[in-house]
Image (spheres, rainbow, N blue to C red):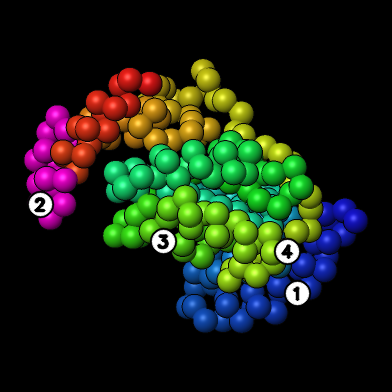
Amino acid sequence: MTASRDFAETLAKVKPEAERLMAQYPQKRSALLSILHAFQNAEGWVSPEALAAAAEMLDLPVSVVESTASFYTLFFRRPVGQYVLQVCRNLSCQLNGAEEIMAYCREKLNVRHFETTYDGRFSYEEVECLAACDRAPCMQVNLEFVYDLTREKIDEILLAMNAGNFEVAPLPQTVKPDVTWFVAHEGEKKSPGAQGVSSPNDPGGIGDPSGRQMIERIVRDPRLVEARPTAERLVRDGAARLEAGAEH
Ligand code: FES
C-alpha cells in the first residue's frame, strides 16, 4: 500500500476533526499545531501530504506549515517506529545521569541517535529540554513523559513494550521506517552565524560541543545561574563533569 493511498483515508479521517478544531479559534491558523497532531495520531508521522493538506485547510503557505512542524521535536517528519523514545540531553538531565541513560538506551536497542531498530519497532532520538527538569533524567515515549530514569526503569519499559502491555499505546505505522533519519550535513551551506555550531546529528552529552559550551559558560561565570536555588550544585557538578569529560 502506498503512502498516498493511505493518505486519502487519513485525510477523510482527519478532516472532520480539523474542521472542529478550526471552528474553536477566531483565526483558523491558530489550529495549526492541533491539526498536525491529528495527522500524526492518524498516520504515526506528519507526511509531506499532511503538511500540504494542513496548509490548504488553513490558507497558509506550505513553507509556514513546514517550518512550524520542523521547529518541534513533537512532530515526526519521517516514518518512525511504533515507539519513539526521545531522551532529554539538556543540562539538568545531564547533571542527573542522562549520559548514562542515553548510552544504555543505545546499547539496549542497538541504535544511535536518529535511528530506528531493524524491525521498525523502536525509534531513538536525543532531544533538548523537555521542560521536566525537576524529574530529570527524563524522556518522552510517543510524547508521553517518563520521569526519573534509571537503567532498571529502561529495562522495565522495554520489557513492557515488547510484551505489548506498556501504558503508552504504540503509534500507528502506515509506512515502514528507514533505519536512519540522519540529517545530511550542511557543511559549507550554513550561514556564517551557524558555522561551528554542532550538528543536530551529534550524540549529545558532555562530548557534544553545544552541551560542553553550555556547562563551560556556567562554570566560568556562575552569575549566569546564581538566582536559581540549584546554582551551587549546577556549578559544582558541572565542573566535575567537565573534568571527567576531558578524559574522553
Ligand atoms: S534538562 Fe531535561 S527536562 Fe530540562
Amino acid at pointer 4: Pro
Q: Is residue 27 left or right of residue 212?
A: right
Measure the alpha-carbon separation of dots 1 and 3: 33 Å
Q: Is residue 239 left or right of residue 156?
A: left
Measure the alpha-carbon separation of dots 3 and 4: 24 Å
Measure the alpha-carbon separation of dots 4 and 2: 45 Å
Q: Which residue is mark 3?
A: 147
Residue 45 x/y as whole percent: 67, 56
Residue nearer the viewer, 113 or 247? 247
Q: Earlier in the sequence, mark 3 or mark 2?
A: 3
Measure the alpha-carbon separation of dots 4 and 1: 14 Å
Q: Which residue is mark 4?
A: 172
- Image vertical order of residue 185 relative to residue 180, above or below: above
Residue 182 x/y as whole percent: 62, 34
Q: Give the residues drawn in magenta, as a range.
A: 218-233
Q: Which residue is mark 1?
A: 13
Cβ–Cβ below 8 Å for labels 1 and 3? no
**Crowd band around label 3 with a 10 angstrom C-alpha radius: few (<14), some (14–19), many (20+):** some
Judged from the image, the secondary structure of the residue bearing numbered disc 4 is loop
